[in-house]
């Protein structure tokens, strides 16, 4: 070969190899994104109609308005420019669901990829020994010695963080009567957090929970609530404080090094006390509450990483929106602070940000399997991995989060134990094919399945309750209301309102055409017996995957005990 061509050729080859390695390095970098999972509490994706705006739930304590969804769900009444911008530049999921519509089981499923009915926690198994029907409600917990999402991500080299509401561990410690014997400090319901001795006890309890949650796979934990605000057992602390939790989220990002990270960021809004409730013109549980009252008592310093609360209210007013929804703009600013911190640290491009809710509460769909309870808002933003303006209109469920995050972390899904969900990685890359033939739901005495067009709900009782129903026993519910059948779950307040606002609540077999009747007004099970039978078979298929768990006449104890053995 002529020498004058050798050097240029070598340089060309080196450049090609260099470019190839550069592309490979870039691809490897983008294959393991940071993940920030942000979740509200009790927020549906359904936009309330005009007549809902003054909805009274007829319990003497009407909440005044429905909890509105985020703007990207099509709600014109709210001001959420940050999240809406992320949704526009990311992917919106129009048919997103959770498998259980109360806090603990939904969170359990999110952090494990398993249905709540598969829980093996000591408390749950004590309540429902193998061979008995389960009654899923706020009784599921992360297991002490079983794999879950954060533990698996730690093994994959991720730094993991937990901020906000828990409600997924140590339910027995939510009862104040168990505090002292387990190392928690006690104080009176009306104790003043402004007093140092009171606030010190509250700070001690917060540190207890922050330390405890780390046992379940988290490297960092701060801004922790054991459960709902009321479980702090103090009147003054029964207020939302988004700045306090947001500071913890920003601290976690700030402390992150070169390794990828996962942050579980669980908000308390809009769960009660509703942040839009006004007393003497003030949003006493939300924007007008004492900004220094937190889950660890009184904090001495001002929390100023987010815009001033008055400024937020003024921005909502300037945008021509209803100030009663300013709580949602408050949350939007919290998400905005996270985005800015990521941008500052140079981590925004390769961070997957998810915004969703643990379940809904539209028309008290919470604690039911109706759309108001199980359908949730969901958007994902990831500049390095999602094409702007993407939409996915097929069925997805919270069982899918764990497999998605594990695959993004580079783990082999066949080696991580039982997963009920399906990875959304191909969906994020633009594939529009359905990933589910149907979805399965479980809550209390109710079970259900849904295809894209049809939903079937079954209501069956355990042996004791079924016997009482046959005998004509009367069940006493919330505020002394009488029923001939029990609520799905033991929480009578939720059961009463769910039964009041969802007319088919007690019906044994329910079939809805979701295309023609998305509000589930017409139970057509008797009019379409063949379709009802088909859907029932899908339900039985799901139920038989739970070894040793009977369900009425659909799955008898002998039907799946063999798989348990």
Image (cartoon, helix red, strand yellow):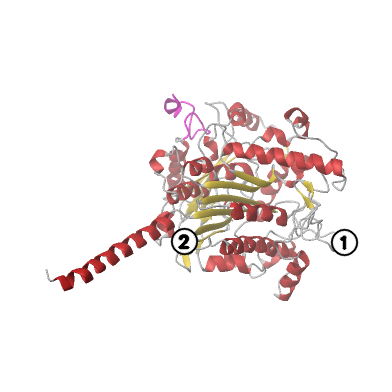
Name the one closer to the observer, 476 or 137. 137
Q: In the rendered image, which residue does mark 2 sit on?
A: 393
Q: Mark 2: few, some, or many residues within 10 Å (few <14, many ≥20)?
A: some
Q: Are marks 1 and 2 in contact (CB under 8 Å)?
A: no
- Check disc 2 and report its element: helix, strand or loop: loop
Q: Can you say which quadrant of the picture contains the N terminus?
A: bottom left
Residue 490 is one of the magenta-drawn residues: no
**Relative side of 30 to 339, left or right:** left
Magenta-colored segment: predominant secondary structure = loop
Query: Where residue 146 sits: x, y (%)?
Result: 52, 33
Residue 60 horizontal side relative to residue 158, left or right: right
Q: Which mark is residue 280?
A: 1
Instruction: Give the spatial CA distance, label 1 vs label 2.
Output: 44 Å
The foreground one among 120 and 472 is 120
Q: Secondary structure at mark 1?
A: loop
Tell which circle, 1 or 2, labels the residue nearer the N-terminal end: 1
Hey, which residue is sitting farthest left in the picture? Answer: 1
Q: Nearer the viewer, mark 1 or mark 2?
A: 1
In the picture, measured across the screen, residue 399 lies left or right of residue 106, that is left
Horizontal and vertical percent position of residue 83: 59, 64
Q: Residue drawn at (57%, 52%), measured in percent from left and top?
A: 256
Closer to the camera, 517 or 53? 53
Q: Is residue 508 visible?
A: no
Looking at the rendering, the stretch of residues picked out in magenta corresponds to 546-565
Is residue 548 a member of the stretch shown in magenta?
yes
Number of residues whose C-alpha sits closer than 10 Å to that of mark 1, classed few (under 14), some (14–19) or many (20 or more): few
Q: Is residue 485 left or right of residue 440?
A: right
Quadrant including the C terminus:
top left
Residue 375 in picture, x, y percent from top left: 56, 54
Answer yes or no: is residue 100 visible.
Answer: yes
Task: Please provide percent x and percent y for residue 504.
Answer: 61, 48
In-front residue for pair 53/178: 178
């Amino acid at each position: 070969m002529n020498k004058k061509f050798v050097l240029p050729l070598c340089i060309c080859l080196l450049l090609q190899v260099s470019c190839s390695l550069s592309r490979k390095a870039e691809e490897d970098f983008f294959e393991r994104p940071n993940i920030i999972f942000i979740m509200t509490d009790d927020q549906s994706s359904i936009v309330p109609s005009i007549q809902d705006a003054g909805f009274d739930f007829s319990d003497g304590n009407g909440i005044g308005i429905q909890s509105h969804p985020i703007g990207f769900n099509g709600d014109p009444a709210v001001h959420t420019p940050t999240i809406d911008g992320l949704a526009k530049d990311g992917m919106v999921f129009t048919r997103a669901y959770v498998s259980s519509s109360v806090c603990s089981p939904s969170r359990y499923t999110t952090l494990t990829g398993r249905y709540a009915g598969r829980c093996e926690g000591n408390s749950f198994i004590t309540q429902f020994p193998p061979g008995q029907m389960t009654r899923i409600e706020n009784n599921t917990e992360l297991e002490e010695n079983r794999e879950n999402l954060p533990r698996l991500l730690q093994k994959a080299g991720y730094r993991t963080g937990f901020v906000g509401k828990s409600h997924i561990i140590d339910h027995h410690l939510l009862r104040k009567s168990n505090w002292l014997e387990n190392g928690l400090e006690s104080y009176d319901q009306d104790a003043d957090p402004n007093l140092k001795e009171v606030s010190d006890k509250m700070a001690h309890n917060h540190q207890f929970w922050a330390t405890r949650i780390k046992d379940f796979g988290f490297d960092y934990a701060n801004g922790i609530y054991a459960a709902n605000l009321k479980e702090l057992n103090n009147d003054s602390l029964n207020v939302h404080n988004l700045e306090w939790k947001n500071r913890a989220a920003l601290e976690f990002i700030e402390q992150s090094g070169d390794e990828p990270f996962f942050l579980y960021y669980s908000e308390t809004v809009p769960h009660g006390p509703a942040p839009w409730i006004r007393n003497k013109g003030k949003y006493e549980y939300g924007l007008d509450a004492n900004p220094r009252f937190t889950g660890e008592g009184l904090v001495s310093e001002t929390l100023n990483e987010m815009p001033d609360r008055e400024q937020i209210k003024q921005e909502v007013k300037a945008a021509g929106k209803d100030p009663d929804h300013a709580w949602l703009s408050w949350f939007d600013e919290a998400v905005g602070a996270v985005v800015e911190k990521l941008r500052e640290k140079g981590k925004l491009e390769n961070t997957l940000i998810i915004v969703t809710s643990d379940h809904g509460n539209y028309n008290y769909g919470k604690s039911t399997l109706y759309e108001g309870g199980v359908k949730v808002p969901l958007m994902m933003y990831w500049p390095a991995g999602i094409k702007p303006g993407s939409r996915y209109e097929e069925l997805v469920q919270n069982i899918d989060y764990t497999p998605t995050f594990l695959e993004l972390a580079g783990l082999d899904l066949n080696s991580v134990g039982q997963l009920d969900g399906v990875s959304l990685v191909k969906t994020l890359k633009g594939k529009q094919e359905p990933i589910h033939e149907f979805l399965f739901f479980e809550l209390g005495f109710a079970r259900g399945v849904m295809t894209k067009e049809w939903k079937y709900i079954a209501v069956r009782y355990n042996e004791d309750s079924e016997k009482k129903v046959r005998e004509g026993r009367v069940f006493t519910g919330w505020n002394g209301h009488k029923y001939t059948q029990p609520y799905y779950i033991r929480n009578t307040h939720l059961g009463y309102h769910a039964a009041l606002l969802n007319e088919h609540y007690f019906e044994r077999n329910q079939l809805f055409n979701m295309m023609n009747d998305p509000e589930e007004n017409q139970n057509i099970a008797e009019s379409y017996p063949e379709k009802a039978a088909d859907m029932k078979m899908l339900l039985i298929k799901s139920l038989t995957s739970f070894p040793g768990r009977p369900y009425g006449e659909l799955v008898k104890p002998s039907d799946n005990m063999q798989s348990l053995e």
